[in-house]
Image (cartoon, coloured by chain):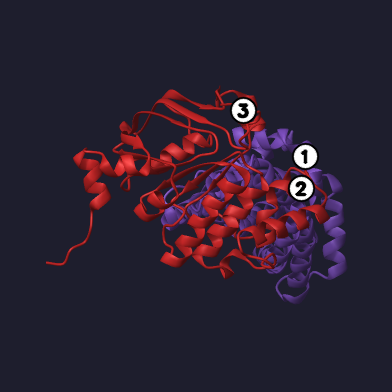
Amino acid sequence: MLLFWRTLAALPLVWRQRQKVFDQFFEIGNASLLMVCILSFFIGGVIALQTGPLLVGRGLGSYVGGIVGYSIAKELAPVMMAILIAGRIGSAMAAEIGSMQVYQEIDALRTMNISPIHYLVLPRLVAIAAALPLLVIFAILVGWLGGAVVCAANDRIAVSFEAFFSALRDAVDLKDVANGVFKSFVFALTIGVVSCHQGLITRGGPRGIGRSVTKAVVNSIVVIVILDYLLTRILLK
Amino acid sequence: MNGSSSNHHGVGVQVRGLRKAFDGQEVLRGLDFEVQAGEIFVIMGPSGSGKTVLLKHLIGLEEPDEGEILIAGQSIQSPEVMSRYRMAMVFQSGALLNSLTVGENVGLYLSEHRLQPPAEIARIVAEKLEVVGLKSTEEKMPSDLSGGMKKRVAIARALVIEPQLILYDEPTSELDPLSAVVIAEQIVDLKDRIGVTSLVVSHDRDLAFGVADRIAVINEGRILTIGTPDEVKQHPDPLVQQFLHADFKRH
């Protein structure tokens, strides 16, 4: 939490670090976009496959689009993308900062009166906080498409594209999407803070870096799942 | 003693009763010494004697359990000292930022603190790299450099700060004898040209007796002796003599 508040206090200096923010932002996008695309398409498809035949069998085929759309927008896209980013980007952040710590690069920054929080943490935190919500919006759209394709292509469901998206429009409004995007923003801050913190406290050579990377990913995922429950409780009200 | 107002460009350093322990194990056991402005002061001692920990205290990377460090008569604990006096450290590994080019590494202090426009930073970087004999290496990455070159880039990075005090941590370790001589020449050259105070931590006896104005020998966190190279050579303490004359003999 201390690292988070210190980074927040450094926020007015973010313009000076804009080049690093853009670099990190595009790195996150480049590293994740294809994975996000594949993962969300198949998550949408699996939800449609699991719920479709069940609902169609009870004469509730017109609800498939709504259920797939709602669950992807509010829950699956933000949580699954956060877990993906924790593994893909959080681990890279912890490894990079951790190796800088072990090989005295961070000490060198301090001797030049350059704060590691301004130089390393701030650009990463701002970049991930901007990138993850955008990735989640993209994941929601691709996930819906995956669900629609499976519903139309699977004989046991046989719900057309038009019927799927019509049901989705009835069930999901902009607030539900905003809900998921807000969650992803909180998850992004969590991944950034946990990963940078683990990097900064790395000790003990290559083995220490490995430990930090593992802890960054595991701790991020645990905190994300707990926060997801708390946020869902709060946002349901 | 006040480096900024004296004839010397360098600043004096006083260490008084410095103590530090990690996990209950005392690493520094009450160090007392003084480094004059503009001199090259070498701290020698075997590995694990507390040399690097001492350097980290001097640059503010560690806080002492007891004692104090004065830069030009002022405690480094007081906030204005670190901003008033310019200090730089050349790390044992060089500690160059591997994601930046040589030029970006050398100019990092100026660019991050926005002290000069980019064109002027480029000129200063080229000038400092030339001083350390690495002209036209700005675009290279640290991974393209040898150990000796990395250390010289680290010295160039320190020079950009226009330091009044440079701390060198094992500047010749892992270097071949020829590269070690180049580094030693640069340490002396900087003292002669800009009068910077240099505090060198090393267990390299050739370097110590070649560059030092005065030498302190430490062992297990205590100073055994301080003096000119000749005085240290003559010192009767058996531990000092053992360290100075340790040699491999094949039986």
Residue B124 coordinates in the image, percent (x, y): 74, 54
Residue type, label 3: Val
Q: Which mark is residue B81?
A: 3
Res B8 quadrant in image:
top right
Quarter holding the C terminus of chain B is bottom left
Residue type, label 2: Gln
Q: How far apart are marks 3 and 2 (CA)?
A: 27 Å
Using a 10 Å C-alpha cutoff, classify the residue at mark 1 as few (fewer than 14 neighbours), some (14 to 19) or many (20 or more): some
Q: How many marks?
A: 3
Q: Is mark 3 on a helix, strand or loop?
A: helix
Residue type, label 1: Leu
In the picture of the structure, the residue carrying the numbered disc 2 is A17
Q: Distance between the residues labelled 2 and 1?
A: 7 Å
In the picture of the structure, the residue carrying the numbered disc 1 is A13
Q: What subunit carries mark 3?
A: B
Tint applied to chain B in the drawing: red
Q: Is residue B16 left or right of residue B231?
A: right
The chain painted purple is A
Residue shown at the point (67%, 64%) measured from the top left: A43
Q: What subunit carries mark 2?
A: A
